[in-house]
Each structure stands twice: as C-alpha cells, then as structure tokens.
Amino acid sequence: MNNSTNSGFSFESDSIDLPPGAWAKAHRRTLRRNGRELLAVTQGALRSYLYPVYTPKGFAVTTESPADHPHHDSVWVASDHVHALVDVGGGRHEEYTYNFYVNDVFQGRAPGRIVETSIMGHAIGADVFRIEQNLEWRGPVEWAAAAGRVIARETRTTDIRVADSHHLIDIRSNFAPAQWDILLAATRHSYFNVRVAESMRVTHGGRLIDADGHEGGDTITAATAPWVDYSGPVGGGHVAGITMVAREGFGDKAWFATDWGMVTLQPFRREGRRIRHGESLDLSARLIVHDGPAPADINRLASAPAIADAT
C-alpha cells in the first residue's frame, strides 16, 4: 500500500486499540485528502466494499449492512447465481452452484466470500487517486475443499477524482474464472450495487430518477437508461446524492431500483453470461457523489472520458 502525501492524499489502515484477546474480523482503509475523508475500502466477513462514501462537504451518502438487508454493503460488487462448470472427464461437466450476494444460504445456494488478497493505492494526478485490489471469489468450506474452492479471481480498480461540488469514482471489475468455465446466470442480484443512506430513501423524502425521465423504483426497474441518480436529505437541511452510470461492458443492461434505497446495475437481468476459463469479463461503472440534487451537467459528467484517460 502506498501513500501519496505530495498530492495531499493518504491511504491508511484504520487502527483501533483492542483489549487483550480481542481481534478485528474486518478491516478498513481510509482515503483522505489533506486530512479530509473521501471514502474507505472495507473488507468485511464476506465481501470487499466502499464504505463510507462522502461528498465534498463531508456528508455520507451510503449505508452499511442495514437491518432489512444486512448483505447490502454501501457500494459493492456481487452476484447470487454463480455456476462453476467443473470438468469431470469424458467431455462432461458438473455444475457447482454458489451465491456471492446474500450472507446466508439463498434459494439453496451456499454463500461464498469475496476476499481481498492484495491492495495498493497511489496518486495518478494532482486530484486523482487509484486503488487496485486483487480478490478471490471463494466458495464455502465443503467436501474436498476445506478452505473453500477458488471459483474466480477479480482485479478491481477504483479511480477517484475530487472536485468542489462532486467526486467522480470509476470502478472497473475484471472477473476471470480460476479453474473452470463460469456461468453468471440471469438474476436481478448482480453486479454493481449501491445502498443509499437511510435518510435519502424516497420513503424518507428522497428522489430517485434516471436519465430517461423515469422517477421512482417501479418505473426505473428493468429500464435501460445510461444513469440513475438517488438524492435526498442528509441532515441539517442539506441534500446530497449519488449517481450510478453504466460504462463499459454493458451491452445489455437493466436497472433494479427501489424506493427504500437500493440501486443495482445489472448486465444479467435478461440473460446470463458464460465466461470461459482463460477469458475474463470486464465491466465498469461510474459514481458521481454530489452535494445538492442531481447536478445540472450530469449528462456531461456521466459521459466524460474515464478518469485515468483524462489524467
């Protein structure tokens, strides 16, 4: 892990003095600029995610493990229909099925873990910071796999550009089968996800809109607009929000959105995708984390070049 103090950025593990005999089951690394928190990368028990995520004025726009859906972790990558097509000889294969979305067994599929194996961060410009992670998608402990099978390996790159009224966050996920072909089957629970702060929910006075003029979860769900914005009250009379933008790899996409605080950008809502061993799936999404309601220039921000390309 690198710190980039010459640009004002620091990326450091949070340290808590625990009593003797206690240990931390999860860990968090916080990105700051000139001492001000921007976001943190958190490795929880079952997945890696961004939490908290702050606006330029310091308001948190996401929530972590809410009571109604404890597997909703702020900004995260996940999928609940993951099928490993395991070669058993004679040109035949068996299908090993896992869930990397819900924390418990879900519809008969045992929960796996998305585990960070390495992380580093460094500035790539005066106002841009890059975080690079390697992650393993591991199945649960099972017969003949005491530590869980490594189903896939993911390289996740998160670029953050800071500005006065908004922060841009580009997340690129490169997903590669570890040993066998992988089928990511059709589901609404995949791939890029955001759970907004409780105060921002439509049910608490927030607003949920997309680029094509739809408003509210019922009309946005299954639509194909290029972006969806969730904005709402964050305290003290202030409003803030977060926009998710479909970027590369989403030839066939559909949104899943709810008035109670959830947005998912889905490439597999209508049809699954098979990724062959030796190949990979490359998907990217953009977040616009903003103070105030959806920015007037949101279409420009959504379609601007990738942060790394513009640096």
Image (cartoon, rainbow, N blue to C red):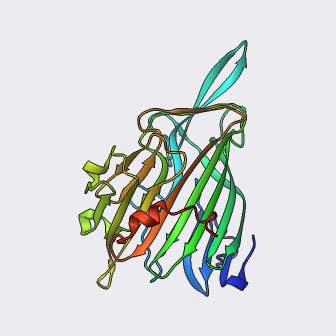
Residue reaching furthest top? 90
Visible in this render: residue 26? Answer: no
Please report the residue visible at 25 percent of the width from the left and 68 percent of the height from the top.
204
In the rendering, at what x and y percent does residue 13 appear? Answer: 67, 74
In the rendering, at what x and y percent does residue 136 appear? Answer: 68, 48
In the rendering, at what x and y percent does residue 297 appear? Answer: 39, 70
Please report the residue visible at 70 percent of the width from the left and 75 percent of the height from the top.
20
Q: Name the foreground residue: 202 vs 144.
A: 202
Say which quadrant the C terminus sits in.
bottom right
The part of the image, by quadrant, that contains residue 206 is bottom left
Please report the residue visible at 71 percent of the width from the left and 72 percent of the height from the top.
122
The part of the image, by quadrant, that contains residue 12 is bottom right
Say which quadrant the N terminus sits in.
bottom right
Looking at the picture, does residue 19 appear above or below residue 284? below
Visible in this render: residue 59? Answer: yes
Q: Name the foreground residue: 77 vs 103.
A: 77
In the rendering, at what x and y percent does residue 272 appear? Answer: 49, 33
Please report the residue visible at 75 percent of the width from the left and 73 percent of the height from the top.
2
